[in-house]
């Protein structure tokens, strides 16, 4: 049984600020990237205890060069680096039986969600697909669903796990902290978090027969509300996007894979509009 791990950082135990997650920060970030790496290791160990064999990790935070190799088993593979066409879902295919989302965070606008955002906090204000308000969990789960792969485990703060379970009710959740607004947490210790994640991962693999792929019905309608009009100015230049308001655009296609790549292009190009002029 092969398991795919998409690993983010904001949902790591004790993390409560952008500084802790910023690779440019030389004080806090090195410590917290190690905590992130150890949580990924805990998920792998739990998966293997449940019967998983192959593991592929996709480093999915920021520049996507965060996880420390020396914290991982020597026989895993990892997708490292950014500007990937499918971003946090790069490398997924039908050879995987289940996927884990570790260190995930709440979608933009969710109360009591640590560092809530959806892909780009400076660019994206809201994302909806077929009218459904989406977090990164939702958007990425639907990419996996194209290949028949279910999300089996989500780790992070309570808001993140409960929001994920509302859309993916079959998942195992590993709650490692309670959010107090956006920038404070009541967290278990890093060691306790690894135990929680390891046990949840083992349960997830043993329950894989109960898991279901998540899919959006076709045709698929993507709606993005940006933080500023300048972001929408750039996004509407992409063929297929229609301007629907001062800060909003829409994209329609039958294939969610095309829709997701259009979303990636839109927030990347839209983000370029934030540069000073």
Image (tube, grey):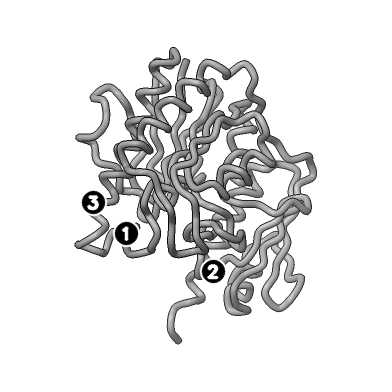
Q: Is residue 48 left or right of residue 182?
A: left
Q: Is label 2 in contact with label 3 (beta carbons under 8 Å)?
A: no
Q: Residue at x 51, y 75 (%)?
A: 273
**Residue at mark 2 to residue at mark 3: CA–CA distance:** 28 Å
SS at circle 3: helix
The disc at residue 20 is: 1
Looking at the figure, which quarter contains the C terminus? bottom left
Residue 140 lies in quadrant = top right
Label 1 or label 3, whichever comes before in sequence order = 1
Residue 51 in percent (x, y) is at 44, 12
The disc at residue 31 is: 3
Q: Is residue 56 visible?
A: no
Label 2 or label 1, whichever comes before in sequence order = 1
Dot in front, 2 or 3: 3
Q: Is label 2 in contact with label 1 (beta carbons under 8 Å)?
A: no
**Residue at mark 2 to residue at mark 1: CA–CA distance:** 21 Å
Q: Residue at x 77, y 50 (%)?
A: 130
**Residue at mark 1 to residue at mark 3: CA–CA distance:** 8 Å
Question: As displayed, is residue 40 above or below residue 276?
Answer: above
Given residues 68 and 177, the one toward you in this image is: 177
Q: Residue at x 67, y 33 (%)?
A: 169
Residue 168 in percent (x, y) is at 66, 36
């Amino acid at each position: 049984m092969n398991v795919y791990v998409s690993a983010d950082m904001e949902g790591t135990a004790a993390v409560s600020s952008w500084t802790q997650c910023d690779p440019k920060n030389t004080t806090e970030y090195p410590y917290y990237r190690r905590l992130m790496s150890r949580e990924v290791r805990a998920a792998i160990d739990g998966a293997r205890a449940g019967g998983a064999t192959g593991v592929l990790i996709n480093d999915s935070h920021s520049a996507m060069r965060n996880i420390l190799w020396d914290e991982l088993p020597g026989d895993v593979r990892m997708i490292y680096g950014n500007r990937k066409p499918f971003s946090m879902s790069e490398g997924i295919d039908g050879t995987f039986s289940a996927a884990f989302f570790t260190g995930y965070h709440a979608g933009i606008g969710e109360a009591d969600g640590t560092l809530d955002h959806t892909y780009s906090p400076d660019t994206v204000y809201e994302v909806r697909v077929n009218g459904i308000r989406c977090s990164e969990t939702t958007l990425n789960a639907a990419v996996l669903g194209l290949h028949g792969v279910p999300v089996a485990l989500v780790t992070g703060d309570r808001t993140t796990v409960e929001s994920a379970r509302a859309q993916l009710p079959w998942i195992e959740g590993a709650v490692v902290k309670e959010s107090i607004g956006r920038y404070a947490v009541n967290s278990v210790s890093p060691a306790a978090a690894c135990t929680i994640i390891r046990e949840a991962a083992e349960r997830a693999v043993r329950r894989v027969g109960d898991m279901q792929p998540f899919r959006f019905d076709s045709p698929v309608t993507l709606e993005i509300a940006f933080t500023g009009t300048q972001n929408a100015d750039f996004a509407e230049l992409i063929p297929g996007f229609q301007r629907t308001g001062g800060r909003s655009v829409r994209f329609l296609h039958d294939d969610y894979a095309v829709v997701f790549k259009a979303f990636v292009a839109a927030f990347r190009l839209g983000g370029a509009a934030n540069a000073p002029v």
